Image (cartoon, helix red, strand yellow):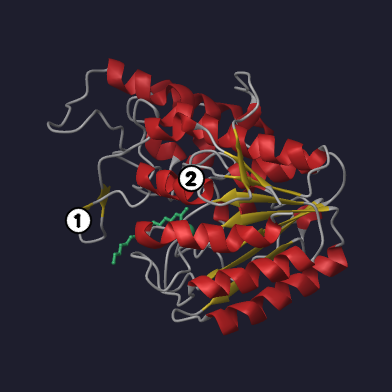
Amino acid sequence: MTLPIVHSETYRRHHPAFEIGSGGRIMPYYESPQRAEIMLEALRATSWAKIVTPEEGRHESLPLLVHDGDYVWFIRNGFKEWLATNPLLPEGYPPTYYPSSFPPPRARRRLKGEARLNASEGYGYYTFDLTAPLIEGTYEAALGAAKCAMTAANLVLYGDRSAYALCRPPGHHAGRDFSGGYCYFNNTAIAAKILSVRGSVAVIDIDYHHGNGTQDIFWEDDRVLTISIHCDPRMDYPYFVGFADEVGGGAGEGYNLNIPLPPGTTGEWYLEALELAFDRMRLFDPWALVIAVGFDTYGDDPISKFDLITSDYVAVAQRLRALNLPTVLVQEGGYNTEALGKNVVAFLEPFAE
Ligand code: SP5
Ligand code: ZN
């Protein structure tokens, strides 16, 4: 029994020093390097995890599969450009590029393609909150995560039944031209896009938070069905997107399904929501499945309000596995570092074969 686990050491290059709570308080950066370290450690201790590194090569055009060129340029070069303007740097932690202003609603589209001209203050154009700052190693880490997703997708294209990408930083909040929610390049969308060379693909996002970036990327696409099960945006992040009436647009109308659930959701309710997702998926009849995996649905997650326990992840995974589709699993959130190890092992084991 084995399951390929694609992992890159580049995640260590991305380690923002803090995040800013809604009360203005400085908090630890929940999306920490320890997350990946702990999951990898726990997987190494199993008999079935086959840890592999991403395919060799620079692959710098990979993010362009799902992101606009000006956005990718900014994630790659924005930090350097900003640093060269001699910003007033803080003491006690490394230089960190936070946006200082944001385009007011409706102003943004006028600037399309020009925002890079003011790289020193322009990051607000490309990011929708304060949780995805740029530091020196952010691009390298984000590209490394994208390569893990690509490699897992290629493994499945070339015949593996399932493959898991241990991506860090995560990706599902990153859209065509924006970062946010700890996300820079949308690893899940990259995997889905690669798999879509062979036919239609379903994405199911089981992170606690709505996969707004993935929804944005495939909004007008009828070849990739996007489904997200998440906490009701009236009650939690990302607050302004993720409602049930968002169904896709243009050719993609009817190819996005949001299933918002209330705070306090248990494993039992969750499994019912999963069946709704499966009903839509069966009609769509994809050749492959991408699962955006988050363990922030865990009862003891520090930033979330669902009530799943470790054995619920086994049940969820068994049902997903029973769909009997070639499957790429992509790591998204999950912030209880104590529990991440046992949860990732519990969830992935049904996919080992
Ligand atoms: C990939 C992913 O899971 N991104 C999630 C981004 C969530 N950002 C909002 C964090 C709000 C933290 N609030 C702290 C409350 C502590 N009780
Ligand atoms: Zn999340």
- SS state under label 1: loop
Give 288 or 336, whichever is nearer the viewer: 336
Q: Quadrant of the C terminus?
A: bottom right
- SS state under label 2: helix
Q: Residue at x 54, y 77 (%)?
A: 261
The residue at which mark 2 appears reads as 40
As drawn, is 25 to the left or to the right of 305? left
**Furthest-bottom residue in view?**
268
Q: Identity of the amino acid at label 1?
A: Gly
Q: Residue at x 56, y 56 (%)?
A: 212
The residue at which mark 1 appears reads as 24
**Furthest-left residue in view?**
91
Quick check: can you spot residue 245? no
From what the image shows, is residue 209 above or below residue 3? below
Q: Residue at x 48, y 45 (%)?
A: 40
As drawn, is 154 to the left or to the right of 10? right
Q: Mark 1 and mark 2: span between their CA atoms? A: 33 Å
Q: Identity of the amino acid at label 2?
A: Leu
